[in-house]
Amino acid sequence: MGSSYAVIGNFDFKQSDKGLSVYCYDEEKGRLYDGRTMFADVSVGQMICDSERSIIYFVDERKDLRGKIGGGGNLLAASFNSEDNSLSLLSENRTFAVQPCSVCTDMEKRYLLVAHHGSDSYVTKIRKDGEEKYTAITSFDDSPLLLFNLHKDGSIGSVCDIAYTSIDGEPGIQRPSHLHSVTCSPDGSLFLVTETGLGRILMYDIDRKNSTLVLRSETTLPSGQGPRYGLFHPILPILYCNDEDIPVMHAYRYTPEGALTWLGDTPLVAEDTPSVHAADVIINPDGTRVYTSLRDIDRIVVCDVDETGKLSVVQRIDCGGKNPRGLTLSPDGRYLFCLNKESRSVTTFSIDQQGLLTATGTELSQPCPGVMRFMTIE
């Protein structure tokens, strides 16, 4: 039986303490202790932990390189030493685009995929057409999906492909693209990418012979909807996405080729509540409960998942803080942790046999918590 550690990523665009905080984890009491924070200048948008190789991959979500104007963000790999809970930099790569916000690896650990949120900024460029006439073009930040090679030692290699999602054109009502998450399917064959700005769900796979990204399907949601985070059901061929613009959970059936069929939306609030924005969404290992956090009203919503994959809300509970961003389950599934960015706290909930939450009253202070992952070191 190995030892478990919790890694908390702190996220903020301002010049404040951020970084990665590593804690020992008491599985019996659901308690985090003996923490230390490193990489304090990194704004950790998202991260993944490779317990087998004791490596943490995380994005530095920023618009400008440190000390410069422009240049985009960074992708880092850090080695974890369980003897003193320390992290040491293994490799760091530029992503070249604005606000890298999500990262995942393929199941063979040959590649890393990084999604970029971009910004709402735009510029107007003068261009000349073929008839010697001038026109104006509205141009947004690139918000691409990047594919990186991974070396055998876990260090990050070079960019081997880029999938562009931004749309430039004549001045009009077009919106900037905002990728928000990238997630690998349970069998490793597909990658779900949520695109909030233009309201799309994109499905990719990897051509491993040529190390390129292959777009399998593109689904556009109705106007006024913006999928934020997506996840796959661990058993059924169904995926779920929460929404940054409306308080619902979207459900889709997917084929092995990546085609999507809409199954319906599940409302997450009982009343007509304006300005409710979802943050994180997670599912338990057996696929019977989905948990999502709602900002603005500071709630965690628990959904039952029936044998067909249909969702129904079974609990709404106060998150115990302000602006709940990340959610995570303990390795044994007995506790849920909620990361509250505005109140700078991590709150703990016990989970009963029905998957329902009860606040334990335990609260951990953090600079600006946004994401939390566990590592189990043998």
Image (cartoon, rainbow, N blue to C red):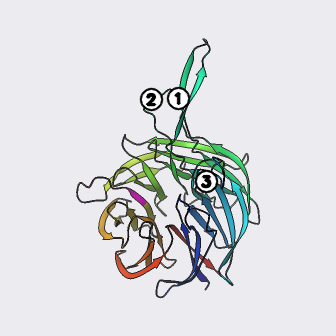
Q: Amino acid at mark 3?
A: Val
Q: Amino acid at mark 2?
A: Gly
Q: Look at 22% across and 57% down and name the residue there.
A: 271
**On screen, residue 133 above or below 127:** above
Find out whether the residues at labels 3 and 1 contact each other: C-beta distance under 8 Å.
no
Give the residue pinned by disc 3.
114
Find out whether the residues at labels 2 and 3 contact each other: C-beta distance under 8 Å.
no
Give the residue pinned by disc 1.
169
In the image, the segment drawn in magenta is 273-279
Instruction: Determine which of the numbered discs, if any, sits on residue 172 in the image.
Output: 2
- Point out the image quarter for the C terminus: bottom right
Residue 264, x across and y down, in percent: 34, 50
Q: Foreground: 73 or 144?
A: 73
The crowd level at tag 2 (other Cα within 10 Å; few <14, some 14-19, many 20+) is few
Find out whether the residues at labels 1 and 2 contact each other: C-beta distance under 8 Å.
yes
Q: Is residue 362 left or right of residue 36?
A: left
Q: Is residue 76 visible?
A: yes
Image quadrant where residue 75 sits: bottom right
